[in-house]
Image (cartoon, helix red, strand yellow):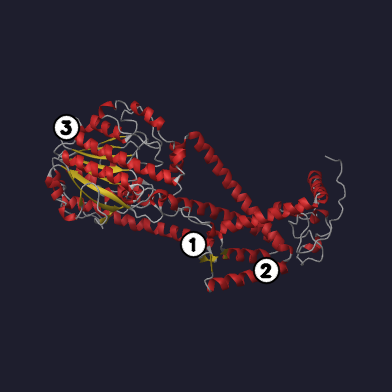
Amino acid sequence: MPASTPSPAPPAPTSPAEPDAEGTTDSAQTTSAAPDDTRSTTAASPAAQDPEGEVAGETVGETPGAPRGRGAGARLARLRAWRERYPQAARAVWWATTVLSVVLVYLALLLPVPLTGFEPRMLLRLPGEAVVIAAVLTALPRRPRVMVAALGGAGLAALTVVNLLDMGFGSYLGRGFNLVLDWELLDDARSYLADSLGGTTTALLTAGVLVLVVALFAGMAAAMVRIGTVLGRDAQQSTRATLVAGTVWITCSVLTVQLAGQPLTVHRAAGALNAQTDRVRDTLRDEAAFGKEARADRFGNTPAAQLLPDLRGKDVVFTFIESYGRSAIEDPVMAPGVDRTLASSTAALEKAGYRAKSGWLTSATYGGSSWLGHSTTLSGLWIDNQQRYRTVMASDHLSLTKAFRKTGAWDTVGVMPGVQKGWPEQKYYGLDKVYNAFQLGYQGPKFSWSTMPDQYALEAYQRLVHGKQRDKPLMSEIILTSSHQPWAPIPKMVGWDQLGDGSVFGPIEKAGRRAGDVIADTTASREEYGKSIQYSVTALTQWLERYGTDDTVLVFLGDHQPISRVSGTHASRDVPVSIVAKDPKVLDRIAGWGWTDGLRPAHGAPVWKMSAFRDRFLLAYGSTPHPSGG
């Protein structure tokens, strides 16, 4: 470092329309520029004349022209010397950073946009918020302008993060991000990635995301300060340009001018902020309203003797197949293979003496959050968010599975291969015993997120529960997981007598496709999803053929549709539901439902809300309503 700071040569005068080599300040210009309320006192200061010096002073709250330490002075001198030596490079840097700042803010103001079906023409818009920002920054004096720009940039960065989350949730779950309820789901997303891509990759991705978020906040704040500084260089010209831009925006908006088939003017940032505000307000209101709804129960006071009398003596199995939606049956890519599986399984079951009827239920969730579908089906309440789920799990509202336990006529059990930690929901569902991922004896490999193949889970259920002698019939809830995204690798059926401890699946898992090869490929995801549904349906129906009895009643359904990348951007939320039994009286009880014979529901078969299933099932099998609460 030099012993003293050389006196800088005064910079060459610049015109208001063409700034000096760096041009990042208001005061680094000649008296020909538009006046600023602070310029007259700072124009003679070397620090004030240097653009970097003014930005530094504005950023940390220094007074332009105030004495600086030798280190700061030396750095400024080097910057001035570099600028004077390489004026063209300095000018290029100035323009590049200015353009990047404008582009960053412009793109942020156009969010959110759909991830699925995104087209570049969606970015050919004029955001109205840009005009407002320009007007505010132009009108403010230098110091307030820097402060407002930095704070506004941080706020826009925060809105951008929320908008990106909103886009992700819309693509995967078919709904927007909820600022009140959905933060805890981010940890579930991290766990899903760890199971699908590995812990190291997930840790690197998580660290990368955190770095990007920090960089976004810093970059957006700096970009807004840069834009404000440029606007402040010539307030008169900036004011005129802002008025022209505002007039153009209002005119195009009133006349609904379109470009590339879309409105030219938008106000997405304001709309996104309003949407989030409305969502938060509605969430807070819904909490109290739903609590009252959950306390009202059509069968809350029904005596045990009047619950499910027409199923006494039957082993009833409720099974949820992960992501088994209408798209699996009707989408032209996935349907042919799934329909063949449903047809062959229906024929095989009929040969074994079973009959089936099938219909449609509209799920409370889409693309994920399977527990919302499970709880909606079994509680008879519409549970479409985490707050409602927590409310119901803490309530005395009668679940369908708990109704079996309340009678005292059934033993109740849950088989949950996807549960890998404590599961307090066991109490609400009325399950005497729950077998989680570590209690089924599996020693084979995981298949991405799925801890074990469905065939093994069903064989373990047979070995540990269904195949044992009991004093009472059995009511079971089984959650199958092999059709969980990312649908790679997918298990294959093996001989039931060869399952052992699951080690037989080792070579199958190694030979399967990798999650990383499928997770971002739409065509591959759709193909592999269809195969996974075929596998799960085959495993379940073969289990029934092999181990079912004259008294076995199987109810199986999907919990939700797969993500929109697989099911499509306009897919319904419908899932298939089937009831299978040997005893003809079981299906006679639901003859009035209008369901389709066999495992494949017809396109026009009745569609109910998933929350309607509990009450319809209880009524069909002889339960008498005795309301409670409400």
Crowd tier of the residue under label 2, counting other residues whose Cα lies within 10 Å: few below 14, some 14–19, many 20 or above: some
Q: For mark 2, what is the residue?
A: 241
Secondary-structure class at tag 3: loop
Asked whether the viewer can see residue 193, the reply is: no
Crowd tier of the residue under label 1, counting other residues whose Cα lies within 10 Å: few below 14, some 14–19, many 20 or above: few
Near-viewer residue (40 or 12): 12
Residue at image coords 60%, 71%: 248
Q: Is residue 325 left or right of residue 192?
A: left
What's the residue type where badge 1 is placed? Asn
Percent x, y for residue 376? Answer: 30, 50
Asked whether the viewer can see residue 446, the reply is: yes
Residue at image coords 36%, 57%: 288
**In 3D space, how far apart are the residues under numbered discs 3 and 1 (Cα atoms)?**
58 Å
Q: Nearer the viewer, mark 3 or mark 2?
A: 2
Near-viewer residue (343 or 357): 343
Q: For mark 1, what is the residue?
A: 274
Percent x, y for residue 417? Answer: 33, 36
Secondary-structure class at tag 1: helix
Asked if the residue at tag 2 contacts the one at tag 3, i.e. Cβ–Cβ closer than 8 Å, the answer is no
Q: Quadrant of residue 402?
A: top left
Which numbered circle lies on residue 470?
3
Percent x, y for residue 29? Answer: 79, 61
Q: Quadrant of residue 2?
A: top right
What's the residue type where badge 2 is placed? Ala
**In 3D space, how far apart are the residues under numbered discs 3 and 2 (Cα atoms)?**
84 Å
Q: Which numbered disc flags the more N-terminal residue, 2 or 1?
A: 2
What's the residue type where badge 3 is placed? Arg
Secondary-structure class at tag 2: helix
In this view, 606 is above or below 324: below
Placement of the C terminus among the 4 image quadrants: bottom left
Q: Is residue 503 left or right of residue 81?
A: left
**In 3D space, how far apart are the residues under numbered discs 2 and 1 (Cα atoms)?**
28 Å
